[in-house]
Image (cartoon, rainbow, N blue to C red):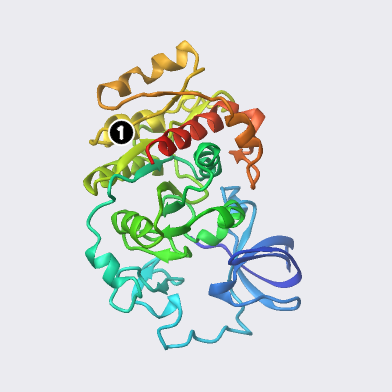
Amino acid sequence: MVRWRSGTVQAVRRRWHGAAELDVVTDEGPLRALAYVELTGEPVVGDRVLLNVGALVMGLGTGGYALVVALPDRLPADPPDDGTTRDTGHLVKARYTPLQVIRLCVDEEASPHREVMAAAESLDGMPVVTADLHSALPAILAGIHADKSQARVAYVMTDGGALPAWFSRTLDGLRPVLAGTVTTGQAYGGDLEASTVHTGLLAARHVLRADVTIVAQGPGNLGTGTTWGFSGVALGEAVNAIGVLGGRPVGSLRISTGDGRPRHRGVSHHSLTAYGKVALVTADLPVPEDLDAGLAAELAPLSNRHRLPRVSVDGLDAALRASPVPLSTMGRKLDEDYAYFVAAAAAGRFAASLI
């Protein structure tokens, strides 16, 4: 159920691509809120806002935000119906919810990329790195650019976490070094919109002209602590899609020495399940060369289907520390969960070696 609140904008704080952070006063006190300006319009001090505070009240993973549903007294104008914006397409996302959005799909008839996408059938061997968590994105990118600084890297965002790409400050900070973002499934707000991971991958290769692509969900992660109950199961399906389309799947392993939960400490059960049980296509699962023997033993079951190449970590520390955005996973910084970020960077380095 939705927990509704009404409030007034007291201050507009920081902004990033597609989003504005607000201080809002409600009858129950002040709240920090987030507005997606392409949906709500531009909020200003004094605006009345309608808020969804459910996840915030329950302490769930919203980043500590109430979410602005509307500026009811000052609605934004309709987008121009002239085919010039991404809102004039026919691709409906967050479908049949009160906040469904209509975007221009990269391969629909009105798209300027229709002809290219209609002819696209293969990834032409492009390496594609898959990752469980959005937090791996900058580390993978650091590993790629450590050796191939000019490589064009695209990001295909799946819909297992946040649906709006605008939620991610990480993605905003990486925009200058990415060839572009494709949002797939129910996710939206990328430079390009696609209906499926398959078309998203093809768009990354043939429209964004990527040398390497990274596939991961948006910020946030659904998990119930059971074998199959987590959004990262889709990793295995992404590996299958990459293989079907003639790409080279490279799996970033989720390895942690800082996570306090037993199921994620060492090699996460997410990696063991997604790569070991869901992925039917052989992938490369790069392993940092300095991985200790205990963790290497945990990975052994994956070798029945996948390759586990050892990757040098020389220079990766410097590459990670030079990241244009802060590195953080579940609140842990680089030095608090070093193995996690190095494993992701090693996957990026290996993918770069395939270009």
Q: Is residue 355 above or below residue 106?
A: above
Considering depth in this image, is 117 or 17 the residue closer to the camera? 117
* Left or right: residue 16 compared with residue 120: right
Q: Is residue 95 above or below residue 146?
A: below
Which quadrant holds residue 167?
bottom right
Which quadrant holds residue 334?
top right
Q: Which residue is drawn at 32% across and 24% down?
A: 302
Q: Where is residue 266 in the image (x, y as percent from the top left)?
A: 49, 22
Q: Where is residue 257 in the image (x, y as percent from the top left)?
A: 56, 23
**Which SS class for mark 1?**
loop
Q: Which residue position holds label 1? A: 283
Q: Is residue 250 above or below residue 193?
A: above
Q: Which residue lies furthest to the top in this view?
A: 293
Tell me how many marks there are.
1
Report the quarter where the C terminus lies: top left
Q: Position of residue 117 (x, y in %)?
A: 28, 65
Q: Which residue is drawn at 35% across and 70% down?
A: 105
Crowd around label 1: few <14 · some 14–19 · many ≥20 (10 Å): many
* Left or right: residue 205 compared with residue 18: left
Considering depth in this image, is 314 or 346 the residue closer to the camera? 314
Q: Residue at x 65, y 44 (%)?
A: 326
Q: Which residue is drawn at 22% across and 64% down?
A: 119
Considering depth in this image, is 158 or 6 the residue closer to the camera? 158
Q: Where is residue 36 in the image (x, y as percent from the top left)?
A: 58, 68
Considering depth in this image, is 6 or 84 the residue closer to the camera? 84
At label 1, the amino acid type is Ala
Q: In this view, does 350 lie above or below 118?
A: above
